[in-house]
Amino acid sequence: MKKTLTIAAAVCMAALAVSCGNKKKAEPAFAVEAYSDSLYMINDSTIGDLQTYVYEGVMPTDAGQPANYVLTINSYGLNADGTYSLTESYTETNGMARTNKDEGEKIVMVGMPNDSTAVVYELISYSNRPKLRLVAEGDSALHKVDKDLKRVSQDIKHKLRRK
């Protein structure tokens, strides 16, 4: 028993001496690794290639005049976020022809009142124009909806058809 206490005391003294020894601040260890370009590449065959989708139609402008719209969407699939360009051509009440061009981001949202599976494209302009929201009707047409995601009208005048 006396031998066990002596050994235990020796172990405690050794541990105390080591822990109270001259302490240096621990230098942070940095591991430097070389990265190759392949680290940042995505190798996912499900993404596919960048696609361009073009829709055309006549819809009323915010002022109510009928305008020819050409909407070009670039994305990695119709139901993926991407970019857009929009050309709006119409004749003003004074007879002058006018063309407006806009570009921005296309954000995809799923769900709207009375249709939880609807796919809605929200077009957000780089030039701070009002957002344009369109609900997809399959892959062949887009129908304009308001800020509450309700159809502006059932009228065909608020649709763009895929070219």
Image: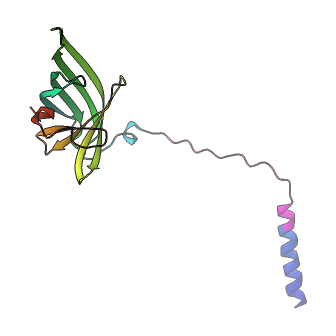
Left or right of 32, for residue 98: left
The residue furthest bottom is 1
Res 102 → quadrant: top left
Which residue is painted at 31% across and 42% down in the image?
148
Q: Is residue 70 magenta?
A: no
In the depicted structure, whether residue 20 falls above or below residue 59: below
Which residue is painted at 84% across and 80% down in the image?
8
Residue stretch rendered in magenta on the structure: 16-33
The quarter of the picture where the C terminus appears is: top left
Q: Is 97 in front, or is 1?
A: 97
The picture places residue 27, in percent across and down from the top left corner, at 71, 46
- Magenta stretch, main secondary structure class: loop
The picture places residue 46, in percent across and down from the top left corner, at 23, 48
The quarter of the picture where the N terminus appears is: bottom right
The picture places residue 9, in percent across and down from the top left corner, at 88, 78
Which residue is painted at 25% across and 19% down in the image?
101
Left or right of 150, for residue 34: right
